[in-house]
Image: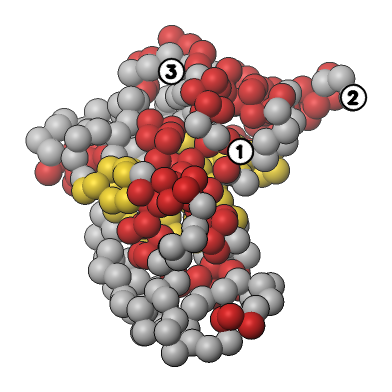
Amino acid sequence: MRHPDTRQTNASHPGTPPSDTPTPDTAPRTDTTRTDTATHSRIMHPDTQPSDDLQDTTNAMHPGTLPCDTPRRYRSDASVRGRIHSIETFGTMDGPGIRFVLFLQGCALRCRYCHNPDTWSASAGRIMTVEQVLAELEPYLDYYWHSGGGLTVSGGEPVQQAPFVAALLREAKRRFHLHTAIDTSGFCEPVHAEAGGLLDAADLVLLDLKLMDAARHVDLTSQPNDRILRFARHLSDTGRKMWIRHVLVPGITDSREDLLALGRFIGSLRGVEKFELLPYHRMGVYKWQQLGLPYPLADVPEPTQREIERAKEIIEEGRKEAEMARPA
């Protein structure tokens, strides 16, 4: 996935030290204190035509309130609970448009360049219901609607809390007509993601492919990549939309052989709408230090622009090669 470990220097993840750039007063918050909108008129998607029963707003409900006649299946979605690491209300790097990005706790991988090792534990963070998350989101709906944005669930690893994520995405789509995405490493058996309706509820999958070499993938992440490659192939075979991401780490993920193999695999997939090459950075080192963990890539430099361009060219070479060989 594009873990928070791959954020650029202008990222606004809540765990990132603030920059000196002032934020306009009208911009969405990046904290998790919800503005009370209970006295506002009901929020509707711009394309929704108001019915007569919505014209009188004197007794307007909070936009996140479920009326008493809401079907039972939606009530159950609203009450599903997940374990949350943090919230970003003005995400611009996790899918199209401006997005509400929910970072979850829990990840089975231990990437050596992880930007957020504090998300690894599945028992940390705070517990929230789908209803509570949507209450945090709704004050910013205009930003998401008018920018073509939506909701992205990241981590940690979202598929590790698949029932909660599926319920949240379904309810966000039903209630607010939002575009939905998951940002994942793909370390999940396809049957698990399909069983709870997670993939059906996601309009887009942001999939992080770290290394094609199986043995070195274990060394880099602590886990093999066979499950990840099966997950990617399943997305392709079932017609899901994907953005593929790859973190370029000098001396680790940047050899010609690795990049060609990555390009060939991407070229063999259907449904890939975009590829993003994410340069390795050291923004999360201080978190390792706070956790008392030695940072394993302390001597690894960030890639130069020339190295980035070289990597793009090699990946594109492999992608074109595979696309030419792929059956129509």
Q: Answer with left or right where residue 239 lies relative to residue 10.
A: right
Q: Answer with left or right where residue 102 lies relative to residue 270.
A: left
Q: Which x, y percent locates residue 197?
A: 55, 35
Task: Give the mark, 2 or 1, whose residue is nearer the N terminus.
Answer: 1
Q: Which x, y percent locates residue 95?
A: 56, 53
Q: Quadrant of the C terminus?
A: top right
**Cα–Cα gap, marks 2 and 3:** 31 Å
On screen, 116 above or below 56? above
**Which residue lies under the disc numbered 3?**
217
Q: What kind of element bears circle 2?
A: loop
Q: Nearer the viewer, mark 1 or mark 3?
A: 1
Task: Give the mark, 1 or 3, whose residue is nearer the N terminus.
Answer: 1
The residue located at (77%, 22%) in the rendering is: 322
**Which residue lies under the disc numbered 1?**
200
On screen, 252 above or below 60? above
> Foreground residue, 194 or 285?
194
Is disc 2 in contact with disc 1, using a CB cutoff of under 8 Å?
no
